[in-house]
Image (cartoon, grey):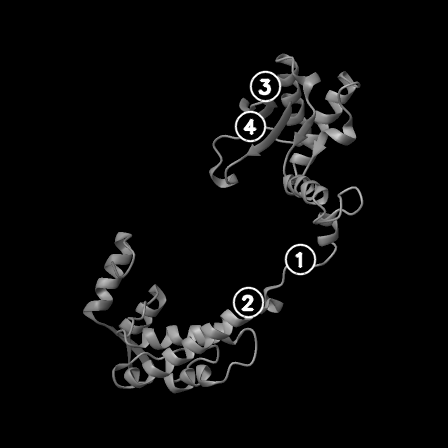
Amino acid sequence: MSAEEDNESPNENKMVHAFCGVVIFYIDKEWVLREHVLNLIPLDGDHSGRLVGKLIFQRLKKDNIAGSLLTSAADHASSNGPLNWTVARKCAALYPEMASMRNIQIGCGGHCTNLVAQKITGTLGISPKPEEIDLYNEAHKSPLVYDSAVDSLVIQEMELMAKEAKSESKNASGDSDTDSDIEEVGSGGSSSEDASNSEYEEDVGSDDDWVEAHLAWKKVKGAKKKKALKIFTPVDKASHLRHPVYSNSSPVYRFTQSQSTFYALKSSGKPPGD
């Protein structure tokens, strides 16, 4: 039999329950692969991998299947490493003729899948045999297995998208000049629409230009919409509703009806603006 374990704990701020799920796999006498949920173990207090591993082993031993365990799989979560190691160690100590700590642990299902696929393709002569070269490990020696920036098909698609976005932005810029009243605010404080439109009139010269062109097209598309209302914070509302009137060099604040309403809402506990 093979076992697969995993822990599930909700967000700490909303944690109500925590469980460990155990699923076993085996081939029956009819050569049919079976999958069976063995247990859903509630976890209280200590969620360490060693403690959960002991609970899993106790259930395997109770069902008389600890001696039949060939593999114990878990993902690479921080607690699943000690969990898997504990299950493997206890099974190997109890049934040394059936299990070994070195062979029983499987931490990455992707590697196992790749080994099976390479075994098939190696037998067909399409790839090296896994006993000679492990292609999974060879691929992971590189810092980045796949880089879209050097993929010719991806580059062609990005260039095409950049051209289409640039064409759309030029066609829409003429319509947006007459009915646009949106003012884009940048990191420097403010910027005009003409300045923002100039960004997407540049030629595509790098891999990231299509992103800028697409964003510029979205800006022009949004320019046709009405100007969005500014959302005032309570501080902004208080400062705008108070009008200083100077008399004999001493400022006297005259409160309008809106200012009175503001403080009435504030004293009632309702957020200003509702």
Dot 2 lies on which element?
Answer: helix
Q: Quadrant of residue 76?
A: top right
Q: Position of residue 122 (x, y in %)?
A: 72, 44
SS category of the residue bearing label 1: loop
Q: Is residue 67 visible?
A: yes
Q: Dot 3, how many residues are within 10 Å of its Cα: few (below 14), some (14-19), or many (20+)?
A: few
The residue at which mark 4 appears reads as: 21
The residue that appears at 52% across and 39% down in the rendered structure is 12
Which callout, 4 or 3, points at the residue further toward the start of the chain? 4
**Percent position (x, y) of residue 115?**
69, 41
**Does dot 4 land on a helix, a strand or a loop?**
strand
Q: Amino acid at mark 4?
A: Gly
Instruction: Verify CB contact (< 8 Å) between mark 1 and mark 3.
Output: no
Nearer to the camera, 146 or 247: 146
Q: Which of the numbered marks, if any, corresponds to residue 145?
A: 1
Residue 77 lies left or right of residue 42; in this view the side is right
Task: For marks 4 and 3, give the one nearer the viewer.
Answer: 3
Kind of residue sitting beneath label 2? Leu
The residue tagged 3 is 28
Q: Is residue 77 visible?
A: no
Q: CA distance from mark 3 to mark 2?
A: 47 Å
| Sequence-first tag of 1 and 3 | 3
Going from N to C along the chain, the mark reached first, 4 or 1, is: 4
Q: Are marks 4 and 3 in contact (CB under 8 Å)?
A: no
